[in-house]
Amino acid sequence: QVQLVESGGGLVQAGGALRLSCSASGRTFSTYTMGWFRPAPGKEREFVAAINWSGGNYAESVKGRFSISRDNAKNTVYLQMNSLKPEDTAVYYCAAGRGSVLSAPSYNYWGQGTQVTVSS
C-alpha cells in the first residue's frame, strides 16, 4: 500500500512557475513509476509527466516547460512547472504504478490532488 500526498499548488500569473511535490509512504517507493496527471476535456485524467528507472517522459503540451524529478531517499517526486499558461490550470494528481507510464489505468495509487491556477 502506498499513500501519496501532493503539495505546492497555488495561484500564479501566466509565465510564472510552481513546483509540485508528492510525498509517498512505504519502503518500496524507488520501485514505482511516478506520474503526474490532470483532468482534460474528454479524458478523466490526462498524462502530464512520469519518471521511472529509464528517466522522464512528458506530454507534448508540457515538454520543454515542465521537469519531473524524484528523490528516492525522501520518497518524494517533484514537478517543476515553468512558463505556465492559463491552459495549465487544473488539479494535478500524483500517481504510483508499475505499468505503462502514459496510461492512467496503469497506476495503482493516487493522491488527492493539488490545485494549480494560472491567471492571464
Image: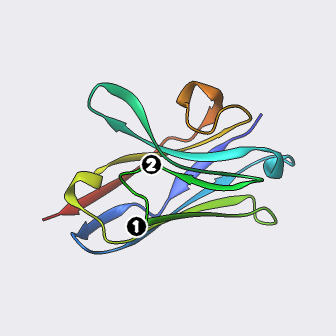
Height in image: 35 above or below 11?
above
Q: Quadrant of the N terminus?
A: top right
Front residue of 1 and 79? 79
Q: Is residue 75 left or right of residue 40?
A: right
Q: Amino acid at mark 2?
A: Ala
Secondary structure at badge 2 equals loop
Residue 18 at x, y percent in the picture: 40, 70
Which quadrant is the C terminus positioned in?
A: bottom left
Residue 119: assigned label: none
Mark 1 lies on residue: 65
Q: Callout 2 environment at 10 Å: few (<14), some (14 to 19), or many (20+)?
A: some
Residue at 17% across, 63% down: 119
Residue drawn where x is 75% and y is 48% of the image: 25
Q: Secondary structure at mark 1?
A: loop
State the residue at coordinates (63%, 28%).
106
The kind of residue on which mark 1 rests is Arg
Give the side of residue 97 with respect to residue 63, left or right. right
Q: Residue furthest bottom?
A: 16
In percent of the image, x 87 and y 49: which residue is there? Answer: 27
- Specify the farthest residue to the right: 27
Image coordinates of residue 81 in percent, x first then y, are: 42, 66
The structure's colour scheme is rainbow
Q: From the top left corner, tell me how far across and down residue 79 is, in percent.
A: 52, 62
Give coordinates of residue 51: x percent, y percent.
65, 53
Q: Quadrant of residue 95?
A: top right
- Which of the 4 image quarters holds residue 45? top left
Tell me: residue 68, above or below residue 1: below
Q: Residues within 10 Å of mark 1 (few under 14, many from 20)?
A: some
> Which residue, given by chain and number where applicable, does mark 2 sit on?
59
